[in-house]
Amino acid sequence: MPPKDPTTVLDARAVERTLKRIADEIVELNDGIEDLVVVGIQRRGVQLAQRIVTMIEKSEGGRVPSGALDITLYRDDLQTVGPRPVVGPTHIPWVIDDKHVVIVDDVLYTGRTVRAALDELADFGRPSRIALAVLVDRGGRELPIHADIVGKKVDVQNGERIDVLVEELDGRDAVILVSRGDA
Amino acid sequence: MSQRSAPRPSGALGKDLLALEPLTADQIRLILDTAEPFKEISERAIKKVPTLRGATIVNLFFEASTRTRISFEFAEKRLSADTVNVAASGSSVSKGETLVDTARNLEAMRIDMVVIRHGASGAAKFLADRIESNVINAGDGTHEHPTQGLLDLLTIRDHFKRFEGLKVCICGDVLHSRVARSNLWGLKKLGAEVAVCGPRSLLPNAIDQLGVTIFDRIEDAIQWADALNILRLQLERMEGGYIPSLREYNRVFGVTRERLERAPRDVLILHPGPMNRGVEIDSDVADGPHSVILDQVTNGVAVRMAVLYLLAGGRPELAESAKRGGER
């Protein structure tokens, strides 16, 4: 694909549909909502997790505990975090021992964020199972990590990047493919 | 940033934290903002994150300290750093050469950071200029105690959510207090109004040139202030002839419940510890509803974690490449 204007991979309606499907698959994977805890990874994973939880609660009629995880302090690249490393809040107000935890993130790429999230979750307790749901799997794994539930698989060429936009932070919902030009 | 030649530059703060005076308001805000998420770590069942795994930190304390040393040690351990405590309270270390030699020997054992407390003003900078490790000033003479200033700022911000226009009075022995100096710089940079109150013998000459209000009567300070930061009256000052007696000090400058009850608003009470109950502060006040003295201690760990984290991380030139290849 030659460098050009950003391509929309998913528009707002498609994002909504995809999240709905992810929500359904989470319920299916978990066989209901018993013992289910949904945890989003800062930043955009948190908003996606929140919406998925709302969808599940609506369709299943029950309460699903949710939380947020900031993995900055568990990264393996502190030396490269950059001049203004802002650490977001981690919020796991539930006991996660023996629960089925589903981690939600926007993009799955190298797998290092997920590795860090698994380490961090282990410091909060010992869930009976941890699953991973992502809106976009863009390939390029550097660790043996895979997602249990994938919203959309996207082939990303060298020099391209996937951006996930969410209403709460970016003003609109979309998944776009941008070429990494100097611009 | 501009310090290309520094061995361990950090984009946010530079190599060392020596004082609040040279920092910008943005840098101070960055430290306070970074401290916020660190508060949560101390509330976890497992109070530890792996962030500084493999880093070695030496706590080099040439002066007695309980609270500050323990607070730093908790901060270091909760970030998974390895720590060594050196309490060099002897007398042979008073010469600069010896200080540098001690630090160079430690550095030869491959350490990453030094937290130093020393009785001489400027000791931390002296050391920072001569070794490659990051240096954090944990109090140098009567100069500054930046992490104490930062934890006071964080505690004030937790309560008031703002600094702009806030009135804070620093009470007591301002002359000998590094805590007072760090508070003064930090508060002024963030937009607060600062006053001092104490016997003239314990106020620095020409302190009014720093743009602070001076109160000779504690009653006036209490009328004016939103918050009082009450300094410890160092008892050895009495022998030095700065004040006539502890009883008289308490009678004239002590912060008592009766005095606070006459204030037009609730006044937040801070004290860096250790307290002399019944001298600069009465027990009713120290344990009263507006005292945040123990919150200061809790915040101290979070602020020190933030400083360690910011000094350890983030080389700007690497950050660029990380940004390019660094989605997940």
Image (cartoon, coloured by chain):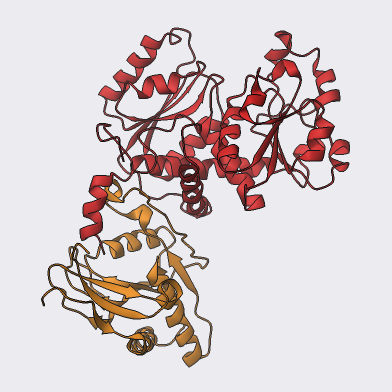
Chain colours: A orange, B red
Residue B212 versus residue B322: which sits nearer the camera? Answer: B212
Which quadrant of the view contains residue B216? top right
Q: Measured from the top left, where is residue B43 in percent x and y? A: 53, 53
Q: Is B45 drawn above or below residue B66 in the view shown?
A: below
Q: Measured from the top left, where is residue B197 in percent x and y? A: 74, 28
* Residue A36 in sight from this viewpoint: no
Q: Is residue B19 left or right of residue A122?
A: right
Q: Is residue A3 left or right of residue B271?
A: left
Q: Measured from the top left, where is residue B230 in percent x and y? A: 71, 32
State the quadrant of the C terminus of chain B.
bottom left
* Residue A60 in sight from this viewpoint: yes
Q: Measured from the top left, where is residue A7 in percent x and y? A: 22, 80
Q: Is A64 drawn above or below residue B272 in the view shown?
A: below
Residue B226 versus residue A87: which sits nearer the camera? Answer: B226
The residue positioned 37% from the left and 39% from the top of the image is: B311
Q: Is B210 drawn above or below residue B163 in the view shown?
A: above
Q: Is B15 drawn above or below residue B48 in the view shown?
A: above
The residue positioned 41% from the left and 54% from the top of the image is: A86
Residue B131 versus residue A112: which sits nearer the camera? Answer: B131
The residue positioned 29% from the left and 24% from the top of the image is: B107
State the quadrant of the N terminus of chain B.
top left
Q: Is residue B320 left or right of residue A28?
A: left
Which quadrant of the view contains residue A154? bottom left
The residue positioned 52% from the left and 35% from the top of the image is: B147
Residue B205 versus residue A38: which sits nearer the camera? Answer: B205
